[in-house]
Amino acid sequence: MASSSSTDRYAANIQGWNIQQVNTPPQYLGRKTLPIKRADAEPLTREDLQYDLLYYIFADQTEAFVDYLAPTRPVVNFCDLYVNALYNSPKCSKVLKDKMVETPAFAIEFAKIALLTNVGRINTTMAFFPEMKTALRSYHPVPSLQKTDGNLQDAPRIKNCLKAALLPFEFKTPPPSSPAEIIEKARNGQVPPTSVVNLIFVLSNSNHAMTVAQKHFDPPVEFLDLFLPINLSSLSRARVFLWLMFHYLQGPDKPNPFDDEYSRSHPGRVPRMIPLSREEQAQENVDPLDEIEWGKRMSALRSKFLRELVDEMEQEKRRKKNPPLPPPVAPSTSYTAQEMAVIRQARAQRMEDPRSRGSSQSHEGRSHGYTSYESSSRPLPQLEPFRADLSGEDPNQERTMLQQAWHVINSTDPLEDSDKEEDEHVRLDYDRRLRVLARLRGKEPTPEPEPQPGSSSQAGQSTGRLQHVQSWR
């Protein structure tokens, strides 16, 4: 309750406000300083938000508003009207909608922070999650409005959601942009004349501040003062706000359920607001200890995140300034056909009998090979003699195609010419491959292969593998 001196001043100035009666903080005297100003990671207190005002606005149960988006309900209270407008915004994400349905308390918390964004108290540089990296926004914990586990998003997303919160017919034609247009539509029977979100945008517009103040308020108060930390009771300011919402959304000619004696006797004027003394004002919007501690923890979490982010950025700068040396490039092992011929010849010469190394043919080929290789920029590689690995193998046992392939890998020098005479295993392997190809082609090889002793039908009878391949025909 107001003090006796305040009550006397209030009674003496019933027809108008005394300039000393409302103490607006100096930082909010200009329209450009309306948004809350806080450093990064600094919590938004209840006084910053005017939490008691928000509580009385959304706790009011007076069902007086027609909700165009809820045709099954004749009238709703302001809380349901505003939350439903946000929920039906095309810019409201599915995740946010699901959370609002799942946790109604979060829906009201989100609506309160959205209302502050709607009137301009929360500007688009604010975010409400500590892992935010961009330098264009600042993080602020909101202990009084983050009691659920929902994400309050950031101010730009909230603003986009609000801008799109129009009535269905307002997407085809522009919504009204002045208080006079809204009143005219309401008087013509269009109820509601616009969405509640658009109405608040219009009333908060600085171009209409003077018009709205002169029409509804006693000096020096205007619409945006309702959301500032001034010495007027939160309950009376909430009543004035709801009175304005009904006046414009339902029409000025209908009985306003938020009227008081002064507004009834002065049509168009808002109900009287109760001045507070300093002591009474200090009793409103008090932060509980648990909210203070939670705000400190979130601020510390934000500071830790920023330190880690800065360290990561510094390490990245150092890596760019001093990039790691590339690994040493292994010498190339690819050679030209001429170099390969020289390598093969050199290996063959090392493997020959020492008595034949002095022959004219060997000397000539060697001389010619080294002469051509010396023109290359690379030295002759020192290759180890190839050593075949035939351990654990029975040369008389017939091999399958897989065993023959493994035998070739372990026993054949890849640098050696392959035109020398091979053994019976190689001929058998070739014969098997040929028959597989013939089966795939559907006809015998052309021209017909020459018959060899010990092969053909006899080989087919002696090997189960060939019998299996021949059975594919």
Image (cartoon, rainbow, N blue to C red):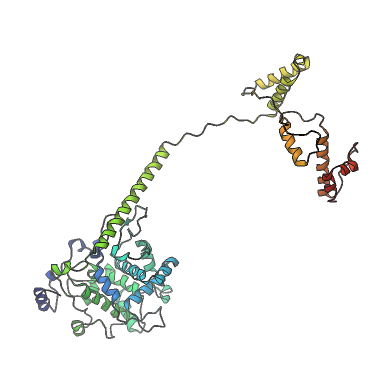
Q: Residue at x 27, y 71 (%)?
A: 54
Q: Position of residue 74 (x, y in %)?
A: 37, 84
Say whether residue 35 is visible.
no
Q: Residue at x 34, y 54 (%)?
A: 136
Q: Position of residue 274 (x, y in %)?
A: 17, 75
Q: Residue at x 19, y 72 (%)?
A: 233
Q: In this image, 79 relative to 370: left or right?
A: left
In the picture shown, does residue 274 fall above or below 412? below
Q: In this image, 307 relative to 444: left or right?
A: left
Q: Position of residue 178 (x, y in %)?
A: 31, 73
Query: Quadrant of residue 226 in the image?
Result: bottom left
Q: Nearer the viewer, residue 467 or 317?
A: 467
Q: In this image, 251 relative to 345: left or right?
A: left
Q: Position of residue 104 (x, y in %)?
A: 37, 72
In the picture shown, does residue 251 fall above or below 315? below
Q: Nearer the viewer, residue 243 or 359?
A: 359
Total numbered labels: 0
